[in-house]
Amino acid sequence: MEKAINNRAWFFVLPVLVFVLFSSLVPLMTVINYSVQDTMGQNNFFFNGIAWFQNLLDPTTDIGGRFAAALVRNLLFSFVVLLIELPLGVGAALCIPRHGWKVGATLVLIALPLLIPYNVVGTIWQIFARADIGLLGYVLTHLGIAYNDTQDPTSAWATILVMDVWHWTGMVALLAYAGLKSIPDAFYQAARIDGAGRWSVFRNIELPKLQKVLVIAVLLRFMGSFMIYTEPSIVTGGGPGESTSFLSLDLVKIALGQVDLGNGAAMSLVYNLITLTICWVFFTVMTQLDRRKDV
Amino acid sequence: MATITLDGIGHAYPSRDPGEARRYALKPVHHVWRQGRAYALLGPSGCGKTTLLNIISGLVTPSDGRLLFDGQDMTHVSTERRNIAQVFQFPVIYDTMTVRENLLFPLRNRGVAKAAAGARVQEIATLLDLVPVLDRRARGLTADAKQKISLGRGLVRSDVSAVLFDEPLTVIDPALKWELRSKLKAVHEALDMLMIYVTHDQVEAMTFADEVVVMNDGRVLQIGTPTELFERPAHAFVGYFIGSPGMNFLPAVLQGDSARVADAVFPLGMRYATRSGTIRLGFRPDYATVTTGGEGVPVAVRRIEDLGRRRLARVALGGHELVATLPPGTTLDGATARLHVTPQHLHVYVDDERIDGDTSGGAA
C-alpha cells in the first residue's frame, strides 16, 4: 500500500526539535567545537582537524595511554559491580517478605541508601574507612588486616566497590521485588503441582519473569557505574596514584584541572559514544536474542 | 485414578474476633466424587467453588472435615504428593521451555524414565493436537494453545487422581471455546479420569459435566444431572441461576392442592400440608405459555421480547412481574392475556427450599 506523503507532519515535530536543540545539541556543540580546535592562548582558536581524537585513541601517546588505562579500569569496575549487585539484589528481593507490615519496613530499610545524596555517601565512606577514626578502617587495622584506602590500591578498590554495592544493590532489589510481585500465584501453585523444587521454581518461573526488569537493572547499573564520579572523588580522589581514576574522574582532571580543552572535549565525546554503544549493544543483545528463540 | 470423598469438608478463614461466629467460605459438605466421572462446580464469583477446588488440590487446608482419596485420608498431605493436576484460569507455562519440555517437566521432577516419559508426552500431545508445535517455544503460542499445554502437563502423569479445572476458558476466544470444550470432553472419554470443572457459566457446566454441583454463598445447594437441575431445582437459587431467563417466583398461599397468587389460583396436582415460612411458587418461563384466550389465569401484558429463536412475554400478575413463553404463531391483542402452566412444572418453595407434595393424597 502506498503511504500518503504529507510534509505538514514536519511542522508538528518542530517544537520537539527546538527543545532538543537547546537542551542537548547546543551545549554539545561547544564540546564538539573544542574537540576540533587548538589554542595558543589569548582566546585565539584555530582548526585542528581530528588530531585530538587521533592522539586520544592511540595508546602509545601520553593522553591515549592514560585514556586506555582509565577505560580498562572503568570497564573492570562496571563488570565487577554488575557481577556482585545483580545476584545480590535478586537474592535480597527473594528474601523480602510478601505480606504484612514487614514488607513496608524492609522496603524502607533497603531504599535508605538510595535516598542519600552522592557526596554524602562519599563523605560517609571516606570517614568510615579512615584507619584512625573510621569504624571500618579502625576495626580492620586492629584485626591485623593491612587496610589503608589512601595508600594501598587494593584497599581503595575494595572500599569503592563495597560502597557502590551498599549504595545501589537496594535499587536492583527493589526492581527485582517489583518483578517478583507481578508473578501470579497460579505459577507457584502449578509448580507445586508439577512437583518442582525451590531451585527449579527460581530457574523456570522467577528468573524468566524477571528478565525484563533485569535488563533495566543491568542498563541502569552499567550506566551508573560507568559514569561514577562523586563518591570515588571524595573517598579516594582517584588515588592512590591513578588506581581508582575512572573515566569521569580522569576527564575532570584533564578538562578542569589541567584546562586541556582539546583533549577534554575529545575525551568527552568518545566517552559518551562508548557509553551509548555499550548500552545499545546490551539492550539489543538481551532483548533480541531471546525473541529470536520464539519463532 | 481415584474416588474422592469429602467428609464434612468446610473452610472458615480465621476470625479476628473470638466471640464472632465463624464465617464459612465453604460450609461443611459431604460428597463423593466418583472415579471416571466429570463434575462441574457452578456458582457465581465468591461462592466458595474455588476454595473447594483448592482444598482438593491441597493449596488450602480445610478447617473442618476430612478429605479421602480412595478411602485414604489426604487432608494434610502436601500438594506435591497428592497426584492432582490443576488447570488454572490463566495459562501457566514455563516461558523458557519448548512445548515438549513443558510437558516433560512434571515427569522429570518425579524421576520418570526418559523413554517412558517421551512416549507419554507424544501420546498426550497427539490427544491435544499439540504435535506440530512440540518443539516451539511455549511463550510464543496463542492463549488456547498455552491452555492446552497447561492441561497437557496435568494429563501426562498417568497416575493422576483427578484433574481440576479452575475456569480454564476465561481467556479463550469465544470462537475457540467450543473447540476446547469438546477437546476436554474427548480427553475425559479417552483417559477415564475424574475431572472437576469450576465455572460460573451454566452452558460450560452443563455441556461438560455428568453431574453439576450448584453452589452459592459457601453452600452446596444441589447436586444433579443438568436435566435434574433444570426440571426440579432443589433451591430457589438453582432455579434462578440455571436457565435463561431464570425461574419465576411468586409469593403464594397454599390451599391444599392449589396455590393462590394474588387473585389467581394455580392447581398443583398434589396436596401440600400447610407450612410456616415464606412460601413461593416457582416455574420456568420455558413451561409457561401466554395465549389470548382459553384457560389459565388472567395477566396484564407488559412487553414482548423477540429473541429470534423464541419470543418471551413479560407479564404482570397482581403486581408481580414474570416471564413466559409466547407460542409460535400467537399474537397478543390488547393488554391482557391468559397464562397457563402445567401442574407438573409448578414447584413450591418454602424459605427457598423446594418441597414435595403428597401425590397419594392426589388431586381431589
Image: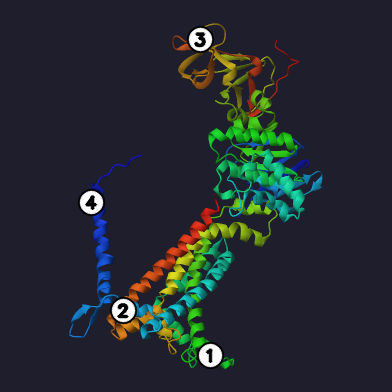
Labelled pair 3, 4 in contact (Cβ < 8 Å)? no
Q: Nearer the viewer, mark 1 or mark 3?
A: 1
> Badge 1, how many Cα within 10 Å: few under 14, some, many 20+?
many
* Badge 3: chain ID: B
Mark closer to the chain start, 1 or 4 = 4
Residue A107 visible? The answer is no
Disc on res. A11: 4
Q: Position of residue B294 (x, y in %)?
A: 55, 6
Q: Which of marks 3 and 4 is in front?
A: 4
Q: Mark 1 points at which residue?
A: A147
Q: Are marks 2 and 1 on the same chain?
A: yes
- Quadrant of res A232: bottom left
> Badge 4, how many Cα within 10 Å: few under 14, some, many 20+?
few
Q: Report the residue at 27% width, 72% height from top.
A: A32
Q: Report the residue at 24% width, 47% height from top.
A: A7
Q: In this view, does B259 lie to the left or right of A147?
A: right
Q: Which of marks 3 and 2 is in front?
A: 2
Q: Where is residue A8 in the image (x, y as percent from the top left)?
A: 23, 47
Labelled pair 3, 2 in contact (Cβ < 8 Å)? no
Q: Mark 2 points at which residue?
A: A52
Labelled pair 2, 4 in contact (Cβ < 8 Å)? no
Disc 2 to disc 4, how far (Cα)? 39 Å
Residue B305 visible? The answer is yes
Disc on res. B330: 3
